[in-house]
Structures are given as C-alpha cells and as structure tokens.
Image: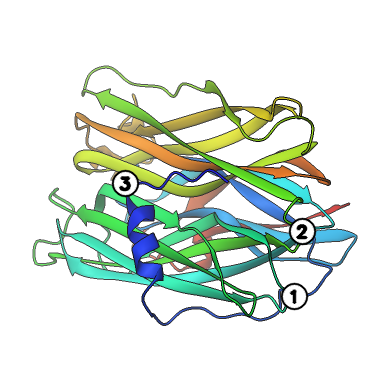
Amino acid sequence: MKTIITGLALILCARLASTSAAPQFDDASDPANDAAFLWNGFNHTWDYNHRAARLGDGIVHQSADGTSCQATLRHTAASGLGPDSAAFTSNFTQISASHLRFASVEVPLRLTGAEGATLFAWSRVDLPTGAHPESSLAVLNGFDMLALGSADKLKSLDLAVGPTRIASDGTLSCAAGVRLNAGCDSLECPPLDQTVDMDVFLEVLFIYTDDSTALATSTKRVSTALTWDKRTEIFPTTVADSITGQGQGSFPAAALALRSLHLSFDSWHHMLEWQTWVTPTAYDANSGQLQFSRTLFFKQWAQGMRWTHLPESLLAQRKSGSGTVGANLVLIQLAEGAAEAQTRAGTIDWPGYNLPPDDPAAVSAEQASFTY
C-alpha cells in the first residue's frame, strides 16, 4: 500500500497516537455489510455569492443485507439572510465485494475561535470489528458544515480522514478532522461579532478485510490553482487523469474515493460555486491503472448574479483573488466484486430571511439502493 500524507492528514497521524473522546459504534461485524456507497465529491452553485451559512454533501445512514445496499444521499445549503437557489450534483460509486466489510459513522466536530485564526478540531474514531482484519482503510464519505451564529467567509478549509490502525483485538482506529480559517469584513457582517462558531459533521467509511489479498490501495494528491479578477468570469475545466495501483490482473475491479478536501485563498471570499469531484471512466486490471475525470474549482462571482433574486442579490460583491482547490484520492482495487459510478442532480430553494441553517429547507435528501 502506497501512502501520501500531506497537510491536515499529517496532523491526524500524530493525533491518532493520543487519546481523545470519539464516536463509537459496534454494529459493523455483520457479515452482510459487504456493499456500500462511496462518495466521489460534488458540485454546488448558487445564483449569487454568499458567506458559508451551511454547505454539505455526502452519504449517510447506509447499510447492506447481503443482496441490497441502502443509503441516504444528502446535499445541504443555506445562505442566511438572502433567498437563493442552489444547483448541485453529487458523485458516488456503488461498490460490493464479498470479502470486504463496510462500516460508516458520522463524526461531529465543533470549531470556535477568533475570526482570522486557523481553527482545528479532530476526533479519534474506533470501530470494534469483532474480527481480525488484515487490511483496512478509512475514507471521507461526505461532510456538513453549519454556522452557529453569524456566517463567515472562507479563507481556508481542510476536511480529512487519516490512516487506519489495527489493534490486536481487531479494533480499527482513524482520526478525522477539520481545519478552518474564516471571517467576515464586508457590509453585511455584524460589526460586533468577531468570532467563528461552526459545527462540522464528517462522514467516515471504514473498509476492511481479513484476507490480505482481497484489497489493494494507492493514493494520489490532485490540485488546481486559480486566479480571478473582477472583470473576466472564470469557468471550470474538467481534466482527464489517472492513478495506478497493482497490475497483472490480480484486481479485476476498482473504485475511487476521497481521503481529504482542501481549499485555500488569498483572503476571505464569498462563495458562488465549489466543485470537487472525480468520476472513474476506465480501468485496466493488467496495468492496474484507473482513468478518471476530475474538476477542482471555486468561483467567487458570475455575470448577472446581482439581478437573480432582487432586491437582496443587489448587494452581491465581486472581489478579485487567487487560491487552490485540492483533494487526496485513494484507488481501491478489488480481487473480486463490482464498482459502478453514478451521479445525482438536484436543487435547493433557500427561503432566506434569517432562517437558521438547520432548517429542513436547507436539506435535499434522497433514499437510494442497489442490488448486487
């Protein structure tokens, strides 16, 4: 197994060695849990730009029974005061393999601190498997972030799941964490509120097996640098890429997953659009190479956005800037099984008018299932 550890993931490696209160769950030893939905990222676009009141995408509440897998595909979005509509696409892969076991958990984290400070929160996640895993990994299967008070603009954001460790009793452990720099310096921001308060929920999916020949993984870091001004609108570019693992036909099926997401900018920015997604397009078991398309993109403004939801959208601001959008990917190769990439598209119509970000209007959820 090849491992690349950068940024927040490096911190999580060190944190895992210490003790911390953590989510616990003990229902993953069920031998029927041999299938899952793997998150492959998302595309989110507002009609005009906003602070980060609420944003999320991912897979929750999933289970399998030996013949079918069920899950909830969820996207969340809230803009705060101004009403708006958000279009989104969620990317995921349906994966099944009789020699693998899957277990998911939601990890709650809270960030509180001064605007402009880099805030960090993490949790250790322990999974008692009731077995003796020989190989394992954990992936980021989604996220949801909600402002507890006044919403702020992002300067940097990292969401990450660290490497797994296998204890002598078969318990799997990993660390999951978030790092954030946010604040607000524009006209709509409350002048006396100089703090950042945010709840972040990370979806973590464990994958493990007691057969060391059933699973192989390789990782790859991808990123895109962006620069924009206030005159020329920018647009996303989809890139053809590849990741190579073990060949010689030993692993006839493969899937792609995410270990971390990364945003970093030159200053605090309103967000109009964020895209971080990957889609497998072809796999060659002889070479061990999986080809995929990817888009890593952030957009601060668009032509005509001020006229989309009058009168509130008239306050939408253009600001020049630069930044980087990145992700850590993991190739999951299967000695037997199947993997199929899928997408889900939808919209969220946010009423605005200071509805809290935990209002049901901020959630688009769809029950999904597949048979195997």
Q: Amino acid at mark 3?
A: His
Horizontal relation, residue 345 to residue 282: left or right: left
Circle number at residue 50: 3
The residue located at (34%, 64%) in the rendering is 14
Secondary element type, mark 2: loop
Q: Locate residue 105, reporting x and y percent.
A: 58, 70
Of pointers 1 and 2, the one earlier in the residue sequence = 1
Residue in front for this viewpoint, 9 or 372: 9
Of pointers 2 and 3, the one earlier in the residue sequence = 3
Residue depth check, mark 2 versus mark 3: number of the one nearer the observer = 2
Q: Distance between the Cα atoms at labels 3 and 1?
A: 43 Å
Secondary element type, mark 3: strand
Q: Locate residue 26, reporting x and y percent.
A: 66, 81
Horizontal relation, residue 358 to residue 280: left or right: left
The residue located at (63%, 66%) in the rendering is 104
Circle number at residue 365: none
Residue in front for this viewpoint, 148 or 48: 148
Q: Locate residue 289, reporting x and y percent.
A: 66, 27
Task: Look at the picture and state if 39 lies above or below 325.
Answer: below
Residue bearing the label numbered 1: 29
